[in-house]
Amino acid sequence: MLNPGDIIGILGGGQLGRMMALAAAKLGLKTHIYCPDPNSPAFDVTPYKTMADYEDEEALQAFAQAVSVVTYEFENIPAPAVDFLKARLPVLPNDNVLKVSQDRLSEKAFFNSIGIKTAGFAPVDSQDDLQKAVETLGLPALLKTRRFGYDGKGQKFLKTPQDLINAFEEIGNQPAILEAFVPFEREISVIAARNQQGQVVSYDIAENVHKDQILKTTTIPANIDEAIAAKARQIGESVATELDYIGVLAIELFLLPDGFDNRLVANEMAPRVHNSGHWTEAACLISQFEQHIRAVAGWPLGNTERHSDCVMTNLIGDDIKERPQLLENKQGAYHSYGKAETRDGRKMGHFTQLSPRSRP
Amino acid sequence: MLNPGDIIGILGGGQLGRMMALAAAKLGLKTHIYCPDPNSPAFDVTPYKTMADYEDEEALQAFAQAVSVVTYEFENIPAPAVDFLKARLPVLPNDNVLKVSQDRLSEKAFFNSIGIKTAGFAPVDSQDDLQKAVETLGLPALLKTRRFGYDGKGQKFLKTPQDLINAFEEIGNQPAILEAFVPFEREISVIAARNQQGQVVSYDIAENVHKDQILKTTTIPANIDEAIAAKARQIGESVATELDYIGVLAIELFLLPDGFDNRLVANEMAPRVHNSGHWTEAACLISQFEQHIRAVAGWPLGNTERHSDCVMTNLIGDDIKERPQLLENKQGAYHSYGKAETRDGRKMGHFTQLSPRSRP
């Protein structure tokens, strides 16, 4: 259990680390950002930082001595860094979670093991495996590297037999997974949190629209039945409980059209605060960032209720140039990550437009 | 007009500077805190700081070169520091405002000059002056130093002629002011903001309760007629306009009982974000802190509408020890200033309890 003034170590200095640091400050806690990138936006919101590689044991040692607990903003932390740190102080969420979520194959197997449906899938370790997997799962299908994929990176959509040619090479001859195509109606996500005392909460279900494989908008409430929403929240909460999870996690789900036996299919999980939860900062009393910090601090979780409906829009690349108009918009909250350089496809900020709360 | 990544200099490193810095971060702006106190809570939320006296010209010079604009969290900045800085870069709000608000006499004269009522008052520069002022204004009355007073410091309440004995000496033989006692029904305050383009906005009127002369609770909406509320907002907005003000300001007002000709009497103003506006962080889309930063940045002001009713309670001294219970309270947001040392009468944090929005 942390005390006011204690320092939380955060691995990763991007916008998620930055927003966690801001939430920690509101709770009277300090943060220390560890990131190799000198231009990390999170370095601008705390005086405590380590700029070093995740392989630098000297830096990791000093970091471990400077902080009371470690958390992270991304799931692809090199395992040796986590092993090094967890031998010295708590690393939350625990690293079993990382092992599950760093690998698409073990993630899907985990979902199935606790009764959560996924698309059909098969491991692919060669072009031959790919051919066989397609025979079982059919086309279209998605070939994805098992590790290090995000925002559509390391993926290939296979529509016709011709697309298979060299596909395994194209994704880099890496351990992969083939996923059957799911004819989904909507993409939704659940943000859940669990603390050290085992308290579990979840936010209202978000409906997500991707563009060029990057999240573009999140709308709350999702346009789904209440029973489906309740089921989705239950999925988030049961995953948190099953994994003995501490912190915030996100699960992306596909909603299949009416008529399917299992309308909810888990796509992937993120063991961290998530872009589809950014709306909570503007539309809830307690944001996902504060919730994560409360959990990591060993403190009680807060209320997840929304006070308003909303649409969160990611500001990607040049979208951030719309700042003057966005600041003029009287129904929305503008959030910039303070990144020095604007690049195509780079998440630069987000904008959350509120409207009065509609249905429960 | 600031650009993302520009640095705002903030004079003062207390909780107000800290919350301004957090608001600036959300807008993608950096902040540089200037404060002589090594334990300033605002030093924990930015890597850019100057720990130096306000008389240190070398430090002021370096500060002026490091930032794009200067603002402040307290009105009692030594005038030479402001003069030094304003010769080099914009200091906002402008220093005319400081001159008016640093001195209770000129503040009251200013209010009267633009048609805003105050309690009767008279300058007091000696024990003799005090006797004469009491003859005119009557008892009870309040003797206050003209400068450097806050939270009841430098004040003496005079009830009987006996209380006059040595009163001028007791407040330190300083230039002072005698204020007639106002039989007020409630204390309210208005938070207004104005930007460089002359746009002016104000928040819903807050009703304040003080304990031991320190703000204890702020309730929104205030329990007052709509016409009174509109008049109070107009007072805030007209002061901002008259002073060519840039940033957020607060005016404390007394509401006199029904039957008085002028039911609203200005008590004092603060040329900065204000404790009675802390509720805006939890109950409005755009907080007073963000509003101030937007104004200082030359950006459009945001929406001041509240989405919820609320009661903000200051956590003073040992109140902060209620943290576990406050975090368990599902209808409230807990905010700690991260101060290392708890002292009697010291503002340690605040708690804002929300309820659904009632009347407009």
Image (cartoon, coloured by chain):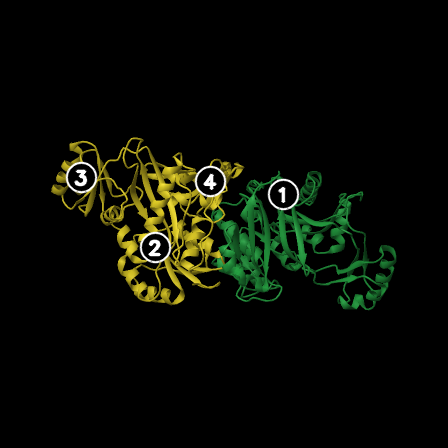
Chain colours: A yellow, B green
Q: Which mark is residue A245?
A: 2
Q: Which label's residue is closer to the chain start, 3 or 2? A: 3
Q: Nearer the viewer, mark 3 or mark 2?
A: 2
Q: Position of residue A277 (x, y in %)?
A: 41, 45
In front here: B222 or A332?
B222
Q: Amino acid at mark 1?
A: Asp
Mark 3 residue element: helix
Q: Which residue is mark 3?
A: A167
Which amino acid type is marked by label 4? Answer: Thr
| Mark 2 burial class by Cα count in 10 Å: few <14, some 14-19, many 20+ | many
Residue B33, compared with residue A128, is above or below; it is below
Q: Give the CA distance from mark 3 to mark 1.
A: 61 Å
Query: Which quarter of the rendered picture does the C terminus of chain B lie within?
Result: top right
Is A356 rendered above or below residue B336? above
Q: Nearer the viewer, residue A232 or A17?
A: A232
Task: Describe residue A261's horizontal placement relative to residue A274 as left or right.
Answer: left
Which part of the image, by quadrant, shows the N terminus of chain B?
Answer: top right
Q: CA distance from mark 4 to mark 1?
A: 22 Å
Instruction: Looking at the image, tell me whether mark 4 or mark 3 is earlier in sequence order.
Output: 3
Say which mark, if any, is on residue A352: 4
Give percent across and percent down for residue A116. 28, 44
Front residue of B137/B217: it is B217
Determine if marks 4 and 3 fall on one subunit.
yes
Kindly state the secondary structure of the residue where label 2 is placed. loop
Same chain? Circles 4 and 1:
no
Have a look at marks 2 and 4 and say if they share a chain.
yes
Chain for disc number 4: A
> Closer to the camera: disc 4 or disc 1?
1
Q: Which residue is mark 1?
A: B204
Q: Tell me if B350 is positioned left or right of A151 in this view.
A: right
The amino acid type of the residue labelled 2 equals Tyr
